[in-house]
Image (cartoon, helix red, strand yellow):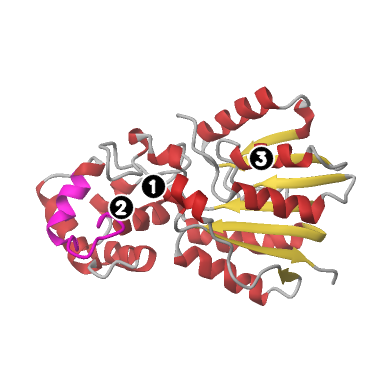
């Protein structure tokens, strides 16, 4: 797996955590979707100018990403005891207790998209996999070849906000009756006749289908709904919970949870979004939204 680009909203994340936690003698932060370690490295760099010692616990369900994170951190940090890494879904992690900060960076990473063998991208041919954790779970191939057409349509509607969900699901059904769909390009070719190419100005018309399948494969919304109360309960008073989302479903879950959890104070009413410079340097950051809440004393 190749090294990724600069982490989305990295400068904003680093400033928020330093502003909120640097008065502590020791700040314990859980980077619950550590990926290749980009945000963690930025945090370590930012805390160098403070008197606060930083310890980061990194969590990721992608074993390949976690290996890269370990290599990056070990090569960049003088103190190997300032971090520890765990391979699991953030919703199943049991080490949030007494954290001063928790960061969730949701969705798929650029390094995953850029690896055709992972099956996340419609631009390069690869197996229809899409599993973040390739050691378990149901792949996208199983969904498109074995699930009922009505259920596939529901997935496309719910997780992709796809207006043509019924037509796309029917097209998948028609294609698989002839021959199983094995690769990402098999899927793109199968659904191409019913995609809305005319109105696809900003994004590829297959984007919503691939997004919806990825969310279903990885149970992303369920994991997010599970982890938020655990993270909130585990934070120390004054601790910070920061969540970066990349589509409206995730953002709505986070926004509503922050609003309804009496133990959290929303730091900013509006979501933080990438600045013009970041957008110019990283087009994939365009849909990112960062929401931040502080744990208050109960």
The residue singled out by tag 1 in the image is 138
Between disc 3 and disc 1, the foreground one is 3
Give the x, y percent position of residue 69.
60, 32
* Chain part drawn in magenta: 186-206
Tell me the tag on residue 154: none
Q: Residue at 53%, 34% (x, y): give it.
A: 65
Between disc 3 and disc 2, the foreground one is 3
The residue singled out by tag 3 in the image is 42
Mark 1 nearby-residue class (10 Å; few <14, some 14–19, many ≥20): some
Left or right: 118 in relation to 105: left
The residue singled out by tag 2 in the image is 143
Image position of 157 with respect to 30: above or below: below
Discs 2, 1 touching: Cβ within 8 Å: yes
Q: Residue at 54%, 68% (x, y): give it.
A: 253
Give the x, y percent position of residue 186.
19, 44
Q: Kindly report the distance in space between the C-alpha atoms of the residues bearing marks 3 and 2.
A: 38 Å
Left or right: 265 in relation to 227: right
Q: Residue at 26%, 52% (x, y): give it.
A: 144
| N-term-proximal mark, 3 vs 1 | 3
Q: Quadrant of residue 20?
A: bottom right
Which image quadrant: the N terminus? top left
Mark 2 nearby-residue class (10 Å; few <14, some 14–19, many ≥20): some
Image position of 25 with respect to 160: above or below: above
Callout 2: helix, strand or loop?
helix
């Amino acid at each position: 797996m190749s090294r990724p680009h600069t982490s989305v909203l990295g400068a904003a994340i680093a400033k928020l955590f330093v502003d909120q936690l640097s008065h502590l003698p020791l700040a314990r932060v859980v980077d619950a979707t550590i990926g290749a370690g980009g945000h963690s490295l930025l945090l370590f760099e930012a805390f160098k100018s403070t008197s606060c010692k930083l310890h980061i616990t990194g969590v990721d369900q992608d074993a390949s990403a976690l290996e890269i994170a370990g290599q990056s951190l070990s090569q960049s940090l003088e103190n190997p005891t300032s971090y520890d890494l765990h391979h699991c879904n953030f919703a199943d992690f049991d080490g949030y207790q007494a954290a001063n900060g928790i960061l969730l960076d949701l969705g798929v990473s650029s390094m995953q998209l850029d690896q055709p063998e992972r099956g996340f991208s419609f631009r390069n041919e690869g197996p229809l996999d899409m599993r973040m954790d390739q050691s378990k779970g149901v792949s996208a191939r199983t969904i498109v070849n074995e699930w009922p057409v009505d259920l596939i349509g529901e997935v496309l509607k719910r997780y992709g906000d796809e207006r043509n969900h019924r037509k796309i699901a029917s097209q998948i059904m028609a294609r698989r009756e002839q021959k199983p769909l094995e690769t990402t390009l098999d899927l793109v070719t199968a659904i191409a006749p019913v995609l809305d190419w005319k109105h696809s100005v900003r994004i590829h018309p297959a984007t919503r289908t691939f997004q919806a399948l990825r969310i279903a494969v990885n149970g992303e919304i369920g994991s997010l709904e599970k982890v938020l109360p655990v993270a909130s309960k585990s934070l120390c008073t004054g601790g910070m919970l920061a969540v970066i989302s990349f589509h409206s479903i995730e953002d709505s879950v986070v926004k509503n949870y922050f609003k309804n959890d009496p133990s959290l104070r929303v730091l900013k009413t509006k979501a933080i979004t990438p600045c013009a410079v970041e957008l110019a340097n990283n087009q994939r950051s365009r849909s990112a939204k960062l929401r931040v809440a502080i744990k208050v004393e109960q």
